[in-house]
Image: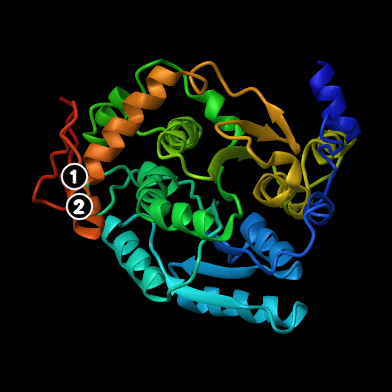
Amino acid sequence: MLTSLRYLAGTAGPSGLGSRTTAEEATAGAGDLRHVTAIITGATSGIGAETARVLAKRGARLVLPARSLKAAEDARARLRCECPGADVVVLPLDLSSLASVRRFVASFLDLGLPLNLLINNAGKYADRFAVSEDGVEMTFATNYLGHFLLTRLLLEKMAETARETGVEGRIVNVSSTIHSWFAGDDALGYLDRVTRRKIPYDPTKAYALSKLANVLHTRALADRLREMNANVTANCVHPGIVRTRLIRDRDGLITNTVFFLASKLLKTIPQAAATTCYVAVHPAVAGVSGKYFADCNEAAPSRLGASSEEAAKLWSFSENLTAEKIQKMMSVHVSAGGFRLQVQSSNTDRGMALA
């Protein structure tokens, strides 16, 4: 109850910031960011676009991956209009395709740029069941697995940049409080069953699972970075629920009251981008890794999201699932884990089996 009241009032937490803080306010203490090169997925609209705008305004060089190059070019034009001289690179990327992720990483590495900041922001909510070209349920493939491989392939570049510049690298995974909506302890078993159509597809549960995976990924990733002795941190954030246009008749006292109360719970896009920007560049977060943030303050994830055992299981599963792709890109040997992926030859009947 106290947390809810603080949220509604916009009361500042230990960081001095709160639910009504905007992205610009959250980066006020970050100073000049001209030394920072950042990759931001999903930066053509919404929270990602605001994140890109605020970082560009502070001088950061941006790399904007996008499935639609036109949308990315339009985003670059908007950024340069507001921030003349902004250094913005556009590259194609479809996160639902592991092959596309590999091509993006190869193109980025060919540019010879440093990499200080990776913001895994892109996400989708699929109303209908679909599988990716790799045979993985589409929401999980886009929101989590593509980002897992993207991060995995860029880790050495980030560690190298941090060593050479002395500037801490940061990885920010955008999750959601909806990760706590996933009920049950068998996340991978659920993914297997829904992918093979053994159970009905529930779009909200699929989305919640993908966001839980973002939280678990962060926990396991922070451990790997420590093992690498890399000057790179990994944290995840809940941006908040964004205020959007509500298309509905608003006649009557009850309806108007509901809409009024809802407006107090929702955030504007600048407010929703605040936590991402805070964790990405604020000096107060230096050295902090493996944590979950909401309203620009550390918060507690769900019980399942806090499980080291579940994080390790998901990491092994994901590493095995993408191991061949990683070897082709980085020549890194990955031992076989306890999972396997079976992709049927038919596009209409692809399935995943957990061994």
Say above or below: 180 vs 240.
Answer: above
Looking at the picture, tell me which residue is in the foreground, 46 or 40: 40
Q: Position of residue 142 (x, y in %)?
A: 40, 50
* Residue at image coords 75%, 78%: 83
Q: Are marks 1 and 2 in contact (CB under 8 Å)?
A: yes
Indicate the colouring scheme.
rainbow
Say above or below: 82 vs 16.
Answer: below
Looking at the picture, tell me which residue is in the foreground, 207 or 49: 49
Q: Return the residue at label 1.
A: 333
**Circle number at residue 257:** none
Say above or below: 122 vs 94.
Answer: above
Q: Position of residue 222 (x, y in %)?
A: 49, 34
Residue type at the position of mark 1: His
Q: Secondary structure at mark 2?
A: helix
Quadrant where the image shows the C terminus: top left
Give the Cα distance between marks 1 and 2. 6 Å
Q: Secondary structure at mark 1?
A: loop
Decide: few, some or many residues near mark 1? Use Cα within 10 Å; few <14, some 14-19, many ≥20.
few
* Residue at image coords 26%, 61%: 99
Decide: few, some or many residues near mark 2? Use Cα within 10 Å; few <14, some 14-19, many ≥20.
few
Q: Could you tell me if residue 248 is visible in this image? A: no
Classify residue 320 by image quadrant. top left
Q: Could you tell me if residue 117 is visible in this image? A: yes
Q: Is residue 177 left or right of residue 212?
A: right
Say above or below: 128 vs 104.
Answer: above
* Residue at image coords 42%, 35%: 206
* Residue at image coords 53%, 45%: 231
Q: Return the residue at label 2.
A: 327
Residue type at the position of mark 2: Gln
Residue extending furthest toward the left: 345
Quadrant where the image shows the N terminus: top right
